[in-house]
Amino acid sequence: MFHLYLIRYNCSKVFLSDIFPKIPSNIHLRYLSSSINPRTLSWEGSSHDILLKNLETFVKNHQVYEAWEAYTDFKKLHGLPDTRLLTKFITELSYSSEPKWLQRACDITLSLSKEKSNLLHIDHLHNLSLSLARAQMPIPASKILRTIIEKNIIPSNNLLGSITLHMVKKEIGTYLASNILIQICDHFLHLGSNKPIKPDIVIFNIVLDACSSYNLSFKAHQIIELMAQMGVIGDAYTIINISRIHVINGQRDELKKFKDCVDEVAGFLGHHYFQFYDSLMSLHFKFNDIDSASELILDMISRKKTHPYLTEKKPFVIPIGSQNLKMGLKLRVLPHLVDENLMKQERNEGLVMYRSGKFVISNNALGKLIVGYKRQGRVSELSDLLWRIQKENVLLKMKDLISNVVEACIHVGWLETAHDILDDIERKGNVICSNSYALLLKAYCESNKHREAEGLLKQIKKLGITVSDKSTRRVPQISETSFMDSHLFTTSRRSDLAKCIVQEIREGEKDCSIYNFNSSIYFFTKAKMIEDALKTYKSMQEKKVYPNVATYIYMVMGYSSLEMYREITILWGDIKRSCDDGNVTINRDLYEVLVLNFLKGGYFERVMEVIGCMKKHGMYLDKWLYRSKFLKLHKGLYRRMKLSDARSEAQGKRLGHVKAFRKWVGID
């Protein structure tokens, strides 16, 4: 029954006089609801017109709160207003800067998409999705965007790029934007001749950059493979993003494939590609490969600033997986193409920098080299490398590089190492600045190393170097072991390089076994050599090398490529044990790839088990993704079957898990 209190927002003198011309305006309408028969007075007709008129007026005057009240009351009494007015109302809500109204616009739109999708105009959906993304509401923005895609309509690249750019400002937005881009690519690849315009490289770059920022590296890897499948040509920004992603995943072999094409343009575009070399050097150190790191340094410092000779702008073809795979994916890139609006400069001081047209290694990189060579007992090779670097004389402020290294070694208590470097350089017919000799002599005296001090003093006199008498002053003994943490080390004499050396010492030598094993597993799974991948995986366990997230994802994807879903359920047991033992970090990418593969294989008990783990760890679950995958593969599965109809206990359990999943994702 119609009640007059439902038009409470109309209790102004103007509207009351229209409805009740003889009733005083200070009498509230709710007192009349029990004494007047609405049907007798034909309230239905008049309320419809008044409410509709008020809604239109409020929308026209941008009175969002009042318009919402009018819409709510009209909907309760008469259902939805006409399409024209409803569209204006949703548009008005979409232009609001308040999340509350944007969310309500989203709720109305989503309800209409289920009930009366023909009322939704694509342009208004585009505007709403963009407004939600701008307001940093990525979850509702993704829902509206997916509503559009479900209509087999892909937004233009300009619009999609704008929405994506705002979504990726948050981690959850990056995760959703990645899944939507994957969805669009899948849509494009399976439409045949009616394909829409494919996403451009700008959109891929935005998502890849965000994935590297939030460590969504395996999601990014999936997008890189889709770029290859879609035939999207990468640019300089793509290469930089890929390099960061490979560092996170420890995929040195994959990154090395890009070096030839980068080398060709790095002399001219060094202000962009120093980030690539930074990533490659970081991977060399991850693998404890100081030889490759040294070779890279010498390669960089000898590079001249020249314009690349590009007679034909043909893309470089980079294989994904093994170089020898005949049917493997190939990514095409044009390394000389640079979008200055997207390229970012160095986020923080890493290992390689670019200053005044020259590549420069940081103290952090130098510290890693020094510690690496010393650990391997190869100080003479370190001396040779330092001399070659200084001889090139292209590193800014590095004309006294060797002196700086010697003094840093002295400050951390490596007196013998410092002396060895001085001797090595002297044998090359060169002499370091006198300050280095004086500092070492003083350090010997302070440490009561009289024999070494006497030998150095003779060496100094032979070289004709003059040192201050203060250098030979004796102080209480400090052992070389404790020297690093002594007062001398913490004084202002301690250089930035010395700090980097100490930090590297304290971190200890890193075990690179996991990276070597993972590289092999990745190669074998891409080559569909799953038996070899499994042998490598078992070898890891025998050698007490704990698998990490990358190990498990490579194995899952290897099994998946061969549709070996049962083997993934066995691997899931290993993953749970590793998680329980604290040997592997909980990771959304890993859980998601498990859910999707268990859905493919029809293992719904495992699906619900993984979903339960994700809920337990407070992870956002992309129900839309799982729902779409289910409807694509199992749309009619047990749709009308009841538990009482199950023919066996096993079928009954499976039916229960299927129904639980359908209910959870909102199908039933």
Image (cartoon, rainbow, N blue to C red):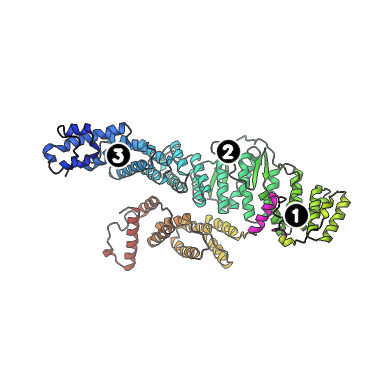
| Magenta range | 483-508
In the foreground, 133 or 326: 133
As drawn, the label of residue 410 is 1
Mark 1 burial class by Cα count in 10 Å: few <14, some 14-19, many 20+: many
Specify which label sits upstream in the sequence, 2 or 1. Answer: 2
In contact (CB < 8 Å): disc 2 and disc 1: no
Residue 291 appears anywhere in the view: no
Mark 3 = which residue?
Answer: 68
In the rendered image, is residue 404 in sight?
A: yes
Residue type at mark 1 is Ile
Q: Position of residue 476 (x, y in %)?
A: 77, 60
SS for dot 1: helix
Please indicate whether residue 97 sits to the left or right of residue 33 in the image.
Answer: right
In this rendering, position of residue 459 left or right of residue 498: right
Mark 2 lies on residue = 314
* Residue under the image location 64 percent in, 50 percent down: 281
* Residue 37 belongs to magenta span: no
Q: Which callout, 2 or 3, points at the residue further toward the start of the chain?
A: 3
Quadrant of res 315? top right
- In the depicted view, which residue is nearer to us: 198 or 324? 198
Residue 320 at x, y = what percent?
Answer: 55, 49
Quarter of the rendering occupied by the N terminus: top left
Tell me which amino acid carries mark 3. Answer: Trp
Q: Which mark is residue 152?
A: none
Residue toward you, 320 or 177: 177
Image location of residue 63, percent across then percent down:
32, 35
The C terminus sits in image quarter: bottom left
Proximity of marks 2 and 3: CB atoms separated by less than 8 Å: no
Q: Earlier in the sequence, mark 1 or mark 3?
A: 3
Spatial CA distance of label 2 from label 3 is 57 Å
Place of residue 357 in the rendered image (x, y in percent of width and height, measured from the top left): 67, 38
